Amino acid sequence: MIAKKTLLALLLVFFLQALLLANLVGQRPFLDEGRYTTAGWLISRGALPYVDMLSPKPPGIEFVLAAAFSLFGASMLTARMLMAAVACAQTFIVFLIARKMFGERAALFSALFYALWSVQFSAYIAVIEPFLALFASIAVLFLYSYLFEEGKERQLFAGCFFLGMMIIFKQTMLPFALGMLGFLFLFNYFKKKQAAFPRPAAIALSGFVAIPLLFLLYLLATNTLPDFIQLMLFPLGMLGSFFQIVLDTRVLVAVLAFSPIPMLLWMSHKGFLPLKQKPFEIILLLLWFLFAFSNTFPFRGCCMHLLPSLPAASVAAGAVIYTGLRKPAHKGLAIFSLFILVSSIASALFFQYAFLSQEYSFRGIEEVASYIKENSGENDSILVLPASPELYFLSQRKPATRRLAFFHEYSEIEQQQTIDELLKNNPRFIVYFVRDSGDAFSGLALVDQFIKDNYGLGETIEMTPPLYKFFHYALVFEPK
């Protein structure tokens, strides 16, 4: 049971986190968020992943968003409120794990740390990473109970079940899942001195494959397994880009957010923490932190992709801050703890202010969505180029092709497939987002030629602020 004072303090942390995230509900969608919300909306209307739409990732988040839209309506508010609930649930799981390791008071600091940093790591956006972080944390919670608290076999099954759950959200978390399973087997071998344990192994394996197996049956039933495999392997055709790391300046905040991890090791070595006599718990925490980095490969964009590692860093931060403030005799540790606490608050407030600026608003693309709505019918389709799929969702107009974004190079065969779909669906509008108003037709050669032959420019809409900071205009083409 959680003490009443602790529970009250935890509720205050939830309130603070909900307040921070609620302020950002109306801010501009991230590129991937547009694809997921559009796919979720289409699924809620009866569409099927890999049949009616293509995606280079498994459709876990799309099914979750579809369920939310079916229950509460298809809107960005629904998507963002869902993510706020996910973030608060994540904070609670962080608290539970930290309490097991370091006690209730340290766990409160862990929960506060995660609540504050969920702003900088964009936990309010409807993308995959918050789900990955949550499922990984739930898995660690169950596995910790099973390994270190003489837990029952159902906890082993549950922990491995959530490891498998991650895989149908994003394939890059497979190394994390396999790493946790490897730790499970090694712990049993070195700690319990058992070379093999067939019954627990069977339980772990059955939990891990339960959801992926159901997804495989779905692919077989819809005859989409070949398409799925091709889409999952598509990045292998861009191996050169794996070595082109694209960094957003916000990645620098991760350096500060993750700094409690090395401090935790130093404190354990010095005997400030009880984990000095519990090396396997420390190893589990470190592996949780390190294996979650698999989500960043190949790295694109901001520290949002580092979010799965944040819960482990938050658990460590709670122990560091609480111990440092409780032992002021060690001035260096006290100063570091106070610095981490104050800088976390300052960072959350700074990014809250930054994300609330006009630069991150929906206003520009909402004007385009309003134009589409006013000049088309509910059953009309549109095509959006090159990569702004949220326009489908915001305008509530179905896409004219199975591809929701054209962000990369595509072969002539794939472009011809797109053209065939355009001929079939006869889109009412083709919207081309560009940096300069005269810079259309700079993307896919065959698709661009099709647009030139069959469509003419009808409207040029200047967007303020620019979409994604670099699309200044929306060129709206109509059939000739």
Image (cartoon, grey):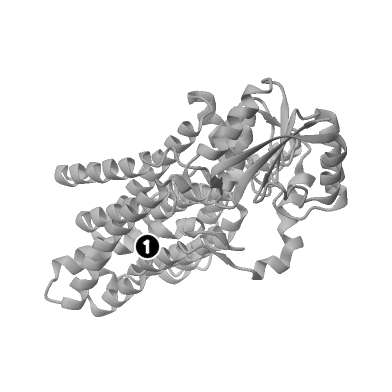
In the displayed structure, 69 sits above or below 432; it is above
Left/right of residue 36 with respect to residue 188 in the rendered view: right
Q: State the residue in front, 202 or 11.
A: 11
Q: Residue at x 65, y 28 (%)?
A: 372
Kindly identify the amino acid type of the residue bearing the numbered disc 1: Ala
Residue 268 lies, in percent from the top left, at: 28, 74
In the displayed structure, 267 sits above or below 182; it is below
Residue 255 lies, in percent from the top left, at: 40, 68
**SS label for mark 1:** helix
Q: Residue at x 50, y 51 (%)?
A: 129
Q: Residue at x 59, y 44 (%)?
A: 210
Answer yes or no: is residue 403 visible: yes
Quarter-wise, where is residue 266 in the image? bottom left
Quarter-wise, where is residue 171 in the image? bottom right
The residue identified by callout 1 is 313
> Split into 4 quadrants, where in the image is the N terminus?
top left
Residue 358 lies, in percent from the top left, at: 44, 45
Left/right of residue 252 with respect to residue 241 in the rendered view: left
User: Tag 1: Cα neighbours inside 10 Å, few (<14), some, or many (≥20)?
Assistant: many
